[in-house]
Image (spheres, rainbow, N blue to C red):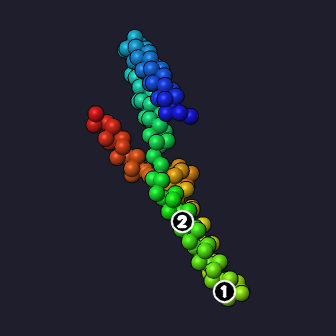
Amino acid sequence: MSEMHLEKKVAAHNAIGSQLWKAVVLAVENTAYPQKAVTAQILPKVSDIFTASENQRLASKFHPPEIIWQALLILSLIGSLVAGYNMGIEKKRDWLVVIVFSILMAGTIFIIFSLEYPRIGKVSLGDFEAELMILRKSF
């Protein structure tokens, strides 16, 4: 999806969100007093919807830098070259090198993909998201 197309979608989303917020506030304002206390409880929930939507939009923009992907490729090639060259000279397979290389490559790829997709992997960005919310509320 192109950046321009995405920006149009975000603008349309924000326009619909603005209309929704105005309608909910108007509905709460037009409610009689005894029920107003109950209907006013919907306002924080609607706000949570907007917050979740904004978090998703921001999360889609954060990706590891290109240098990390290049380093992963170069590290894989160099490691493969060293392991293959060593085994080619000795004319036998060194299982320790094969196992260590496989574990290191799998671990590196796992960490990078966990950073790329933090909601799926083991890496948590909860503190980072909390700071973004504090920053957002300050405006």
Question: Foreground residue, 127 or 6?
Answer: 6
- Badge 1, how many Cα within 10 Å: few under 14, some, many 20+? few
**Residue 102 placed where, x, y %?**
63, 72
In the rendered image, the vertical position of residue 24 relative to residue 113, given as above or below: above
Q: Residue at x 46, y 42 (%)?
A: 61
In the rendered image, the vertical position of residue 112 relative to residue 16, given as above or below: below
Residue identified by numbered label 2: 74
Q: Residue at x 61, y 72 (%)?
A: 80
Q: Amino acid at mark 1?
A: Ile
The disc at residue 76 is: none
The disc at residue 89 is: 1
Q: Amino acid at mark 2?
A: Ile
Q: Is residue 52 visible?
A: no
Which of the image's four quarters has the C terminus? top left
**Residue 129 placed where, x, y %?**
40, 46
Q: Reading the chain from its start, which is encountered first: label 2 or label 1? A: 2
